[in-house]
Image: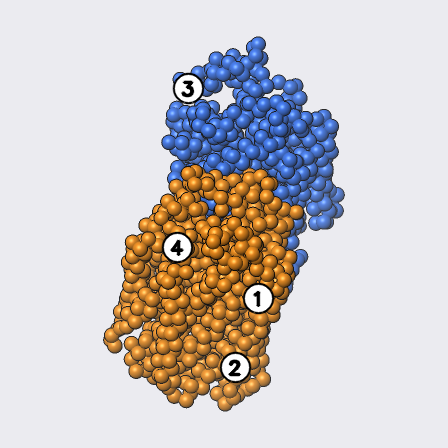
Chain colours: A blue, B orange
């Protein structure tokens, strides 16, 4: 093991250490008045109540999936480490959600109190609390990766085990291959097989992160909107009390929802993308043909470790970036934004410099460097496009506000049109990004290098996640701080300051959503390529030798590249032969059928999550109405509403309602795999990725544009608050809420989860296809 | 030439003859009172004014495209017959629109007058007038096909021309191949090449039909909604006058719109599908490898002519079906529906019997028979699913009506969810249909046979178009009859009867829309396969011999299948080699990039058409307001409004607004072809087809469900007309209008047009890819 590898666990521990440091320093701040403490305590309890229930449900699902995976391992269609890796992936993702939420709910009152002192103080508390979330996500993800790599590399795939075979729980873990070991040392052929096995096994622990993300993102999305609608519709509209008023029984649930959806949900989503992109790229690195690596001047170890190293460096630079975020006491909105941009932009520039260093150290090629540049640029462009289509400073959102004068129908039509139009820039960016990363890294000459480069584009986009996630998580903290200030009846000046922070949070959240979907697309792309490798590996394990080019395209290809033969030709021919063997071409109706089903899945999943919000909100509305009706003292302020009941109802509703979409998302790839084979699965993933991405952009941006069109009118345009235009805009905003906060973001999960399920099921799919 | 071929031109002339007969017998009916005649005359003039303008614009576009195609032919990247075939395809499609509209506008007053006598009389007039549209569409489409086949087969590809080469306008039309002719007769190798060239040339005349359909369907869709919104918003809402009131300046334009959108638009759409599916299947038949045909016991001629024969038989059976539609004087709504079902169902059953006859005559295989069964079944299932999700007799639409009680936002959210959910049945049906047709026709053994079978599923679905289109076109005629009765102030009993017919028309229109999108999907699928053949043909023409398997996979493959070699293996290996040559696999980022862009195109095109409606409606609204303002006598009935001005404005708006989406739809496949090659184009078509289909089903069904939810409330549910729920449902209906009448149906056109443009550009794309 190269000593430089230890930068990976060191960086991850560093991230966790700084997270602890930021947490501690945040906790030193005062929570303010007793009333502020009390409110914060309600939100904290609500958030924990939600998490407890979610973890209970998640535990049941994990136990079921663990048993299924173990059974699969027993029948040798699954690596026996996978069930365990699955659990750790899920556990760490869940832990991040827990710590992030804990921090956020401790931070809200402290941010409000900080804002009562100065704007900068408020920003510091909120932003550094967000940084806790950012750093635990990258820290635990990378720690998990490093730990597994160490365990598998050092203790499982030892020369003895490689030569003699290791049995574990009665299962054959490592096939006995004496030829992989020369004089007690694993030789180069053995090393490649070993790294492929390790990375492909590790890849499947992403399944744990995906399952956790499903519950956090989809369940959180349903929760937050159900609570929001309940609070708004009954409290604001029917009872006529203002936003965040303590008399509203759903107000605590609403504040909890911000944390549940935007902190825990977003965190789990990006945890999955982060881990997935690193693992997929490592697997693609391990599968680079030997002669391709030789041409590129890389060893197999370097190709596998490089994505982890980039992530490790990204962590260190993110920490530096976090310290760069500070502003003057007299800061304007623009100053605040610039402060955040300095942090995120600064760490991105630094990561490019570090990449150049890695090139000169011979760890990555110049092509990979450019792929990272492309990945970072794609993230920025998608973020900017999101900003253009959803900010009220530009034509699209202003146009919706104008249409609102003619009533709700034209508002909806125009918003749908804006959302649909807005898909073009992100799609073209992703297409150019994929193609650019492929060619820049040398895909035209070395096919596998090009795919490896695409993986690196995703790794590059996510390398500074430590700080970008901080800017995302900071928004809901500021939002909650505002709620706290309102409920605790602090000086309006405090609310003004938290509002400034909140508005800043909305801007970063919009670009953050573009970033989340962009990285999900690139990660899914890398995962699909890795899926092919996984299938190829299983194929070579299961298919008997001598059955023609299929086996030749499988394991033989990894091991027996004869010296002197043109490696490029072999690699490229092998990939083509392999894809021809599985007919992953448009001539195959299974492939086209898969694309069709993938497309449909995106629409169906959106419909299911939207319906779920509707039903969960309905229960919430009934409960709030019941409290107002039965507890007469609430509106006069004499009786305290039963906040906990609303939290409990929203929690139960969200977790119950997410079962159907979850089952569909997990079951369909399995069914398609069993019924339509590898070609059907690849089609499903391609259709799901492309339509899911486009639909998500549409829903996110339409929702964002409606939201801001409403705010634009509330600023006094077209008649301002209470005008006909405003009423129409409120309808648009209400329609947009589940679009942008539930269904749209949930599609990120669908795209990645379906791919992950397919990766985990590859052994079964291949076995069935060979029956 | 086999004499049995003449059934094809005979059937098409028969169709035109019966169309003439139905037209004449409709014209014998009285148009009723002077007032009725006057109103009918207004609508007729408006419709013709619209068509005149459309044809002017279309002519300009056709001239430009004709010149471009001629230039391409000059540079030998296009067959020189293509520009001419392009013109005839467009001309006949346009002629169908003209005749159909003429008939419909002559029929409305006569239907109203017929309904004043009896319900059956009204049904007869309306339905047989619809049958004129159905029969001219199938008649002219098949006549054009038959004529071109005769011309090319008898006069162009003669033995002399094949051996010596024919020059035409200075262009080499037929390459000199002495080896194709033995003793003055074209030998079997020559016959195959000849049929491939003929069918592939004919295929491109579908481009003319596509271009015409683009203008008719998209322009018509914009027109009809702009007029509708103008009439409703200003007339009904602002001025408070009832629907179809003669005082409303936009009312004539509204009635014209029904004809323009639902008669001419739908007709041109299905003309394109009908011609496209027959031509694509013929091309796929011609490209069947010789030994595959031998195994199936077919000659090349039979494989090419079979789809035309099925269409010809379908025409005859449609005519019989039309005569079967009649009902008692005391008919209920259910009787009426059953009468229509007897006609359409009867002709479908008969076509299956005829297919069995063709099997015994050795013209088609049993596999093809089952493919036709599957195609017909798929059409019925999609139609039924549409009915389930959009009729107020079932839960989805009732659910929307219930949600309407909570306001417009929940109405919209629930409708979007219903529309998205409704995609699953049609998608699964199409996937099972494609896979079923592939396997049933023997795709597992003979790859090319499977693809040929998919083509036949489309041909089968459309074989009885003569009568199914009659049931579609009859709706707007009944609708117009109702308008006529209203404006002419006839006995309310007449309006009741026309309303019964109209409601029946709405039911058939909903299933008709499902049928149109289903057939568009299967046609596009067949066209994509034919595109591959087109590329292969161009490839073999352009690529120099001796450049490896590419040429081997091209022309050599068609001609030199050695006797004694297993034909199955050759065919399947060749297809795989070919697709590998073009990397049409998911490993190729160009292919995945193409899928992404195809997905995005569906969303972008929908957005553009929706925006176009908004703008065109805006101009209309201004005009109606202006007339009310400046001509004070209108509302009192003293002054006649300027109907023609509204018609002119709507016409101009529709034609102007459709330029941008049209240019995008035509240009993107060309750009993708030039920049991303064949793999990119195939991806674009696959992504456009799958996402376009799913999005179209979503938009059609959401729109249909909103419409019927509103009508359900108007029947007195949830408070009935004027209630809060009704107001919310009206918002849903208004949003749904451009969904279901403009953007949704326009996607049919996008899917087929992009494929057609790619087929026509194949020569250029291949040439560029070989530079």
* Residue position for label 2: B643
Give the x, y percent position of residue A729: 55, 61
Q: Nearer the viewer, mark 3 or mark 4?
A: 4
Question: In the rendered image of this protein, does residue A754 appear above or below residue B356?
Answer: above
Is tag 4's residue or tag 1's residue first in the polypeptide sequence?
Answer: 4
Query: Is residue A226 in view from this perspective?
Result: no
Q: Name which residue lies at 67% across and 43% down.
A: A377
Question: In the rendered image of this protein, does residue A2 appear above or below residue A68?
Answer: above
Q: Secondary structure at mark 3?
A: strand
Q: Name which residue lies at 50% across and 81% down.
A: B45
How many angstroms separate mark 2 from mark 3 (CA)? 84 Å
How many angstroms separate mark 3 from mark 4 (CA)? 59 Å
The disc placed on residue A171 is 3
Q: Name which residue lies at 48% across and 33% down.
A: A759
**Label 4 crowding class (10 Å Cα cut-off): few <14, some 14-19, many 20+?**
many
**Label 3 crowding class (10 Å Cα cut-off): few <14, some 14-19, many 20+?**
some
Q: Chain of mark 1?
A: B
Q: Chain of mark 2?
A: B
Question: Decide: marks 2, 4 in contact (CB < 8 A)?
Answer: no
Give the x, y percent position of residue B64: 62, 66
Residue at the top extreme? A183
Q: Secondary structure at mark 2?
A: helix
Give the x, y percent position of residue A347: 70, 36
Q: Nearer the viewer, mark 3 or mark 1?
A: 1
Q: Which of the image's four quarters has the C terminus of chain A? A: top left
Q: Name which residue lies at 38% across and 46% down.
A: B294
How many angstroms separate mark 2 from mark 4 (CA)? 54 Å
* Residue position for label 1: B658
The disc placed on residue B302 is 4
**Label 2 crowding class (10 Å Cα cut-off): few <14, some 14-19, many 20+?**
many
Question: Decide: marks 1, 2 in contact (CB < 8 A)?
Answer: no
- In the picture, residue B474 is in which quadrant? bottom left
């Amino acid at each position: 093991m190269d000593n430089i590898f230890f930068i990976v666990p060191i960086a991850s521990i560093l991230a966790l250490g700084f997270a602890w440091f930021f947490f501690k320093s945040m906790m030193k701040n005062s929570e303010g008045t007793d009333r502020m403490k009390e409110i914060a305590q309600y939100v904290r309890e609500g958030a924990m109540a939600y998490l407890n229930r979610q973890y209970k449900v998640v535990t049941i699902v994990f136990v079921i999936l663990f048993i299924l995976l173990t059974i699969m391992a027993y029948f040798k269609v699954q690596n026996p480490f996978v069930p365990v890796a699955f659990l750790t992936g899920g556990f760490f993702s869940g832990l991040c959600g827990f710590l992030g939420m804990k921090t956020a709910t401790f931070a809200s009152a402290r941010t409000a109190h900080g804002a009562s002192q100065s704007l900068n103080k408020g920003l510091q508390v909120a932003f550094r609390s967000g940084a806790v979330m950012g750093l635990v996500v990258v820290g635990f993800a990378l720690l998990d990766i490093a730990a597994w790599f160490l365990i598998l590399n050092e203790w499982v795939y030892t020369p003895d085990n490689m030569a003699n075979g290791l049995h574990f729980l009665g299962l054959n873990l490592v096939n006995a291959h004496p030829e992989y070991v020369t004089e007690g040392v694993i030789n180069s052929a053995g090393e490649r097989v070993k790294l492929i096995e390790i990375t492909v096994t590790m890849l499947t622990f992403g399944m744990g992160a995906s399952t956790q993300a499903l519950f956090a993102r989809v369940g959180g999305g349903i929760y937050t909107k159900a609570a929001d609608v309940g609070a708004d519709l009954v409290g604001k509209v029917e009872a006529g009390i203002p936003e965040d008023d303590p008399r509203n029984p759903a107000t605590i649930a609403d504040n909890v929802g911000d944390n549940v959806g935007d902190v825990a949900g977003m965190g789990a989503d990006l945890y999955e993308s982060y881990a997935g992109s690193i693992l997929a790229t490592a697997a693609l690195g391990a599968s680079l043909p030997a002669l391709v690596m030789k041409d590129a001047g890389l060893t197999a170890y370097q190709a596998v470790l490089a994505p982890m190293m980039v992530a490790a460096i990204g962590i260190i630079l993110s920490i530096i970036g976090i310290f760069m975020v500070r502003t003057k006491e007299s800061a304007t909105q623009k100053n605040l934004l610039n402060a955040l941009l300095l942090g995120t932009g600064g760490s991105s520039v630094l990561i490019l410099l570090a990449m150049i260093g890695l090139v000169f150290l011979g760890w990555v090629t110049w092509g990979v460097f450019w792929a990272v540049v492309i990945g970072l640029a794609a993230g920025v462009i998608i973020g900017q496009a999101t900003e253009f289509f959803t900010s009220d400073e530009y034509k699209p959102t202003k146009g919706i506000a104008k249409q609102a004068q003619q009533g709700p129908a034209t508002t909806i039509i125009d918003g749908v049109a804006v959302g649909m139009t807005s898909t073009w820039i992100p799609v073209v960016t992703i297409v150019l990004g994929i193609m650019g990363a492929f060619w820049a890294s040398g895909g035209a000459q070395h096919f596998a290098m090009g795919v490896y480069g695409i993986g690196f584009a995703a790794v590059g986009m996510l390398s500074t996640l430590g700080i970008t996630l901080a800017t995302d998580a900071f928004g809901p903290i500021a939002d909650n701080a505002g709620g706290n200030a309102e409920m605790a009846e602090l000086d309006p000046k405090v609310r003004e300051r938290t509002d400034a922070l909140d508005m800043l949070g909305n801007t970063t959240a919009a670009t953050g959503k573009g970033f989340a979907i962009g990285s999900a697309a690139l990660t899914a792309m890398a995962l699909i390529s890795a899926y092919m490798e996984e299938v190829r590996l299983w194929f070579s394990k299961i298919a008997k030798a001598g059955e023609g080019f299929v086996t030749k395209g499988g394991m033989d290809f990894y091991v027996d590249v004869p010296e002197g033969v043109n490696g490029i030709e072999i690699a490229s021919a092998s990939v083509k032969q392999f894809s021809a063997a599985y007919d992953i071409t448009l001539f195959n109706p299974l492939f086209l059928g898969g694309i069709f089903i993938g497309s449909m899945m995106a629409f169906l999943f959106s419909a299911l999550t939207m319906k779920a919000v509707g039903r969960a909100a309905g229960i919430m509305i009934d409960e709030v109405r019941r409290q107002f009706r039965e507890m007469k003292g609430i509106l006069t302020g004499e009786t305290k509403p039963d906040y906990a009941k609303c939290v409990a109802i929203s929690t139960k509703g969200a977790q119950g309602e997410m079962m159907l979409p979850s089952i569909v998302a997990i079951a369909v790839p399995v069914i398609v795999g069993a019924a339509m084979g590898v070609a059907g699965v690849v089609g499903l993933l391609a259709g799901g990725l492309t339509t899911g991405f486009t639909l998500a952009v549409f829903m996110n941006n339409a929702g964002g544009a409606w939201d801001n069109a409403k705010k634009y009118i509330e600023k006094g345009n077209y008649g301002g608050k209470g005008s006909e235009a405003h009423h129409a805009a409120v309808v648009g905003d209400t329609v947009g809420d589940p679009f942008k906060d539930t269904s749209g973001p949930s599609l990120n999960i669908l795209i990645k989860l379906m791919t992950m399920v397919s990766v985990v099921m590859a052994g079964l799919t291949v076995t069935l296809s060979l029956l």
